Image: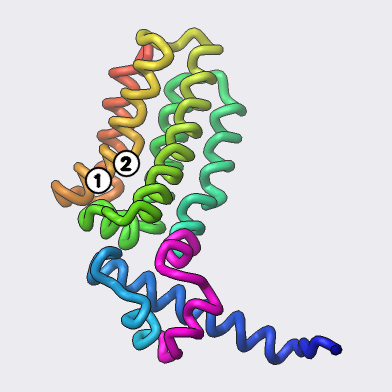
């Protein structure tokens, strides 16, 4: 039997998938991941429930797809390249502050919603933990660069923890989300605090 595969059908399938993911993102942001059902997603995307499963899978698979642009944002690689390109520790911290700011700002509605609405489903928790570990690994690479430059006043593991506190999720969530700072103000302050806490010579 010959498989029928036309560009028009492929385009329609891709459009359906995009509509489902966009509807899912909106619902996760407005209602919280835990409260949203596949039926809710189907209704918002104007498709049948079986179409959702056939196009994107269940809720966990949808969450993974919705999170993918944030986890795989090109700014991560660009930031690590900037870190590798300079021998100035203060410039390294500034590059990380700018890069993490860009990533959070681009995806803020989803990132903040997932933080506010605590995840409980095991698959969702696992995805969130995986994204966090990827973020931590990138910050650990930054710390390794600072170790190579003999720029730290803390040991490596403590430096990773401190960098996570200021330029990982906690700093941005607290200052922008909880306290209502704008990203410009938060970037300047968090960068300065990270320099002061980490570097032998902060300026």
Majority secondary structure in the magenta region: helix
Magenta-drawn stretch contains 47:
yes
Mark 1 highlights which residue? 173
Left or right: residue 107 versus residue 112 is right
Looking at the rendering, the stretch of residues picked out in magenta corresponds to: 45-65
C-beta proximity under 8 Å, tags 1 and 2: yes
Residue 102 appearing in the image: no
Left or right: residue 1 versus residue 199 is right
Q: Is 177 located above or below residue 95 in the figure?
A: below
Magenta-drawn stretch contains 57:
yes
Q: Quadrant of the N terminus?
A: bottom right
Is residue 97 or residue 51 the one in the foreground?
51
Mark 1, Cα crowd under 10 Å, few <14 / some 14-19 / many 20+, is some
Q: Quadrant of the C terminus?
A: top left
Percent coordinates x, y for residue 152 in the rendering: 41, 11
Question: Looking at this rendering, what residue extends furthest in the right direction?
Answer: 2
Percent coordinates x, y for residue 32 in the rendering: 25, 65
Label 1 to label 2: alpha-carbon separation? 6 Å
Mark 2 highlights which residue? 169
- Dot 1 falls on a residue whose secondary structure is helix
Q: Residue at x 45, y 64 (%)?
A: 66
């Amino acid at each position: 039997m010959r498989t029928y595969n036309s560009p028009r059908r492929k385009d329609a399938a891709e459009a359906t998938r995009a509509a489902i993911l966009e509807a899912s993102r909106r619902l996760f942001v407005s209602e919280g991941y835990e409260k949203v059902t596949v039926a809710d997603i189907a209704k918002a995307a104007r498709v049948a429930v079986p179409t959702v499963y056939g196009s994107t899978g269940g809720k966990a698979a949808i969450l993974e797809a919705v999170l993918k642009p944030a986890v795989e944002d090109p700014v991560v690689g660009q930031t690590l390249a900037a870190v590798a390109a300079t021998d100035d520790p203060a410039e390294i911290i500034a590059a990380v502050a700018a890069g993490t700011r860009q990533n959070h700002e681009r995806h803020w509605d989803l990132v903040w919603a997932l933080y506010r609405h605590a995840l409980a489903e095991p698959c969702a928790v696992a995805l969130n933990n995986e994204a966090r570990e990827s973020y931590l690994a990138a910050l650990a690479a930054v710390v390794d660069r600072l170790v190579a430059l003999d720029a730290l006043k803390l040991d490596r593991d403590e430096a990773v923890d401190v960098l996570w506190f200021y330029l990982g999720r906690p700093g941005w969530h607290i200052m922008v989300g909880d306290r209502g700072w704008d990203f410009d103000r938060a970037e300047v302050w968090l960068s300065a605090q990270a320099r002061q806490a980490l570097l032998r010579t902060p300026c």
